[in-house]
């Protein structure tokens, strides 16, 4: 990767995605569907090796019986794919196969990704004009202050209004200062939002100590501040810090 990505739970400078390709049988054999996934051991416990093995040993055999006569039927079939095998979570492996099925079914039956949203009972997904109301978040990342400031301004010029900064990592205070300087005006006027994500990297005392600095910078929400074993302390943290 050209840019190293890091947060409190992990750091990555390489990516090892797995791509699944499904090919339809005649008379639809001109179509291929692709699904991509990236195993993250610190999220699901999966690795690239276990994902490949689970697809080969547990999911591929199921595909041998895959037959459908409509787009909806393909989605219903994909929804039945297992998420656990022998008590292990296989979300990353399933995601690759599921996406490949959706892609192949869409090409075969000439349906769009928006139709998946309708099938999931999300009536606003893909509605005409939805792109004018959908909101995406910009990420506050980078070690070079000047480049970070430029990236934030570029994201604002592009139209982004919501931003997320990774904290509980080396140098997060400096990144927060840059974000506060560049975004301070629009944050104070309510024209943008800034939230922080600690990726379970803080103890209760560390999160409480960081809260005043976050609040001064305009942060209004703190995501996953504490380690999983400290979930019982979240109520106290919310009360002390007044952060969502």
Image: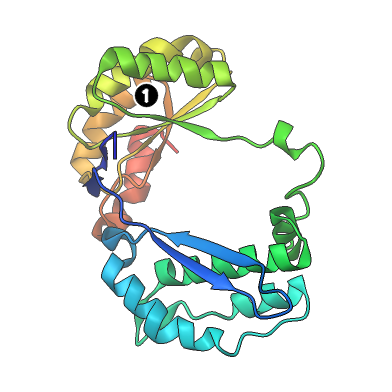
Q: Residue at image x 71%, y 36%? A: 131
Q: Nearer the viewer, residue 210 or 123?
A: 123
Q: Nearer the viewer, residue 225 or 60?
A: 60
Residue 207 lies, in percent from the top left, at 25, 38
Which residue, given by chain and number where applicable, does mark 1 sit on?
215
Q: Residue at image x 47%, y 82%? A: 60
Instruction: State the SS at label 1.
Output: helix
Q: Residue at image x 26%, y 56%? A: 230
**Picture mark count:** 1
Name the quadrant of the N terminus. top left
Residue 182 lies, in percent from the top left, at 41, 12
Q: Nearer the viewer, residue 209 or 223?
A: 223
Residue 184 lies, in percent from the top left, at 44, 12
Q: Which quarter of the figure has residue 223?
A: top left
Q: Residue at image x 24%, y 43%? A: 13
Q: Residues within 10 Å of mark 1 (few under 14, many from 20)?
A: some
Left or right: 125 as drawn, with respect to 166: right
Q: Which quarter of the figure has residue 7?
A: top left
Measured along the vertical axis of the image, is residue 203 above or below residue 99? above
Left or right: 70 as drawn, with respect to 237: right
Name the quadrant of the C terminus. top left
Residue 38 lies, in percent from the top left, at 37, 58
């Amino acid at each position: 990767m050209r840019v190293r990505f890091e947060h409190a739970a992990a750091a990555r400078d390489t990516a090892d995605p797995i791509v699944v390709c499904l090919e339809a049988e005649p008379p639809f054999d001109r179509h291929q569907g692709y699904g991509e996934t990236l195993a993250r051991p610190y999220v699901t416990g999966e690795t690239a090796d276990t994902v490949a093995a689970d697809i080969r040993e547990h999911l591929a055999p199921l595909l041998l019986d895959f037959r459908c006569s409509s787009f909806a039927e393909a989605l219903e079939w994909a929804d039945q794919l297992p998420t656990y095998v022998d008590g292990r979570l296989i979300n990353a492996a399933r995601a690759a196969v599921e996406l490949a099925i959706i892609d192949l079914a869409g090409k075969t039956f000439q349906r769009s990704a928006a139709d998946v949203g309708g099938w999931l009972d999300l009536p606003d997904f893909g509605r005409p004009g939805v792109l004018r109301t959908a909101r995406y978040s910009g990420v506050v990342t980078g070690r070079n202050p000047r480049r970070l400031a430029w990236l934030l301004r570029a994201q604002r010029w592009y139209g982004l209004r919501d931003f997320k900064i990774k904290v509980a990592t080396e140098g997060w205070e400096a990144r927060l200062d840059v974000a506060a300087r560049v975004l301070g005006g629009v944050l104070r006027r309510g024209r943008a939002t800034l939230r922080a994500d600690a990726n379970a990297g803080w103890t209760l005392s560390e999160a409480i100590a960081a809260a005043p600095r976050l609040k001064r910078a305009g942060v209004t929400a703190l995501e996953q501040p504490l380690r999983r074993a400290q979930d019982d302390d979240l109520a106290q943290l919310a009360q002390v810090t007044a952060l969502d």
